[in-house]
Image (cartoon, rainbow, N blue to C red):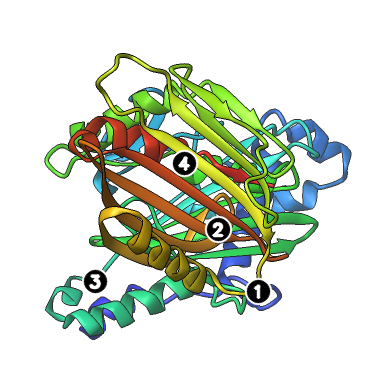
Amino acid sequence: MEEDESRWTIKKVSKEFGTLFLIIFTLFLFFLLSYHPKFKKISDDNNQNNIAQSTSSSSSTSSSSSTSSSSNSDYQVFGDYGIAVKLPCVLEDVSNQTNADFDLNYGGIDNANNKEKLAAYQLMIIKLPVGYKDLSPKELNEKVDFKLKEILGNFKNLKSVYFGYENYPAYVVETNHNGYAQKAIAFNKENFIYCLTVMTNDNLNTRFNYLTNNIKFLDSKNHNNFSESNNTKDATLRNNLKETYSNQYFSIKHPSSWEIVQENNQMTKQTLVSVQIMEKQKNDIDFRPNINIIVGQKRLENTTLLAEIGIEQNKTNLSDYRVISVKDDILLGNCQGTKVEQSCSLGSYKLNFIQYVLKKPDNTTYVITGTFDAKKTESQGTIVNEIINTVDIK
């Protein structure tokens, strides 16, 4: 067990930065700025040759299909690690630029020739020690939680969240260093811990949301292909989200087969705005899946309590109402909150609906509800989730 644990030991590159997260990402960014061909001249013009002298003179790029490739609709596939990402740049192996003990460490840069628009991305992966399989569920959760915090440098402002439809345990951190804003998420799925980071002064939250919305997990039977049930279909749906609705409170993407049926309707004195997006009518039989977004006044109650209030109201007002699951500390649209999965009956329809109760730091509340036919979860439920995950709260 000690031998397995030793692979987690992080070698400190410099005491100056004090945390693993800043050390790795700062060195990674400096390396990219110095050696990316489009940025080389700008770097030289600003007397940054000292950076080039302090790092390796070239990057090591892997072209192995089992490690990285640019297939599957521009997704970069890391087959050995069960993940694919879609970014505005190609990630390259930067593991030789740090002494940290990662199984995979890839980075890339977008808008390298424009300092104001520059954005650096990084993907780091660690495989859990084999000995972890013998741990009890409680011990495993404690070990994984420790490693998630460790890979993000144990910052005091770490936020515990759940990531993805499957609610993987995760932490998010946002920091500033050397004049750049940076945001990272680390989460655990099966035998791996994944850490994805973006560093930029150009729309950090928008870029971070794009990063997290374009992560796909691979079929365990064939890591070079997307899972048919979740990933290929999701990628196709996401490519169809070409329409954007935006107001002063949020933006959301949806397919052209959906329409805005209600906009800026102030339902109550506590409501700032209410917007409903619904699938265009196909026939007189099928239930039309829809999404409602209500922006409310500032509330002091936490999202858990607000969700509970909604549940009690639904028990009174809805037929055959049932709570399927409740998850606190989820992350959506750059806000934390509570997610409630529910079901009810409406006439001849059996419906499922997903409700997010979110709060901004200033206590402005958002209630986002997606409703679909329970018998058509594969089609309607999937697109509802895809649309909701494009929400960007301003």
Chain-order first, disc 1 or disc 4: 1
User: Of discs 2 and 3, which sits in the foreground?
Assistant: 2
- Where does label 2 land, which residue? 184
Cβ–Cβ under 8 Å for marks 1 and 4: no
The answer for how far apart the CA atoms under marks 4 and 3 are is: 35 Å
Question: Neighbour class for label 2 at 10 Å: few (<14), some, many (≥20)?
Answer: many
Residue 163, position in %: x, y?
40, 57
Q: Secondary structure at mark 4?
A: helix
Q: Secondary structure at mark 2?
A: strand
Residue 231, position in %: x, y?
28, 35
In percent of the image, x 61 and y 42: which residue is there? 274
Question: Neighbour class for label 3 at 10 Å: few (<14), some, many (≥20)?
Answer: some
The amino acid marked with disc number 4 is: Ile
Cβ–Cβ under 8 Å for marks 4 and 2: no
- Where does label 4 land, which residue? 388
- Where does label 1 land, which residue? 300
